[in-house]
Amino acid sequence: MSISGEWYLVLSAVLFTIGAVGLLVRRNVLVMFMCVELMLNAANLTFVTFARELNDIGGQVAVFFVLVVAAAEVVVGLGILVAIFRRKVGATADDAHTLKG
Amino acid sequence: MGAPVVFATATLPDAITFALGAAIIIIGALGVVFMRNPVHSALMLVMTLFGVAVLFVEENAQFLAAVQVIVYAGAIVVLFLFVIMLLGVDRQEHVLADSFKGQRLVAFVLGIFVLIEVVLLGNGHWTTGAHSVQGGLRGRSNVVLLGRSIFTSYLLPFEVTSALLVVAVIGAVVLARRPGRADLGDDDVGATHGKDPTDAYGESGDANAAEKVSSS
């Protein structure tokens, strides 16, 4: 018998928390993006766990779509970053405050 | 007391796989957050993604494990590394320097709150146990089940995600395109000439282009 689902849920909760803390602590925009990826992976782990626990393929399909959306998000986000960095030199979120009125 | 419970309900290989995968994930995630160099953070992210893929295999999601390694570790992290090296932002950052007073403290307190909230939500009985129309995981291979589900019930969302990918690619191209010499509609050309950017759209556009070519 394999590991019960609670352990996977605890692990994904911890992973989500680490990602959230990283998003709040770090100021480098690229690392903040990576922390978003960590949180998405925590959600994916939860989906797969519930797919196994409930014996339902729907959870794995949801993970499939999350992967696609994450890829699109990273592409557009990094494109915006490159566009910002071309104008000014600065790697932190504080340097990109021009949208603040 | 945690480990004996795991070992009581699971076979030894499963327990060892889970423990190793969990350790890889946690160490990698902490590395992403606390590494000073963004390149090291990206490599630690690869480690975390591999750990998640290991746990996917452990949970009988073999196709997703393969996709996880190929798409996440293979494509997305490479994209991160390309951008890091293209922009030359791989300089060290003091991780825990507060950009405003008490940012670190606020972040950790909020993190604790997030953890408590997630655990509280997990303790409630939010799952009804009702099944979707997709059917179970057992009986056929994982790829067959997933493909059958995606290309029948989830066909419309699948097509919408393909449209989303096309939009993302077009957006990335538009955002990353370096403005050409003749493309005076872009306002940083106007900025270098110290003129009103809207002027570049007008009749002086050709003159502007000739001036820029001659000056460079």
Image (cartoon, grey):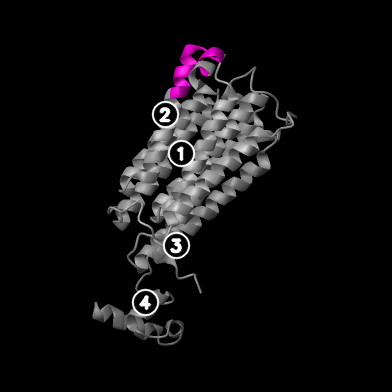
Say whether disc 4 or disc 1 marks the residue closer to the N-terminus: 1
**Left or right of residue B189: residue A41:** right
Residue type at mark 4? Val
- State the residue position of label 2: B23
The image position of residue B88, as x and y in percent, is 28, 56
> What residue would you read off at disc 4?
B189
Q: Are marks 3 and 1 in contact (CB under 8 Å)?
A: no
What SS does tag 1 mark? helix
Which of the labelled discs sits on residue B175, or is there none? 3
- Residue in the foreground of this view, choosing between B112 and A45: B112
- Residue at 63% x, 29% y: name it: A50
Q: Name which of mark 2 and mark 1 comes first in the sequence.
A: 2
First along the sequence among labels 3 and 1: 1
Q: Amino acid at mark 2?
A: Ala
**Does the segment drawn in magenta span residue B9?**
yes
Mark 2 or 3, which is nearer the eye?
Answer: 2
Q: Amino acid at mark 3?
A: Leu
Query: Callout 2: residue from which chain?
Result: B
Q: Is residue A10 left or right of residue B37?
A: right
Q: Amino acid at mark 1?
A: Val
Above or below, comparing residue B52 to residue A26 in the picture: above
Residue found at x 25% / y 81%: B214
Relative image position of residue B186 (x, y in whole percent):
42, 74
The residue segment tinted magenta is: B6-19
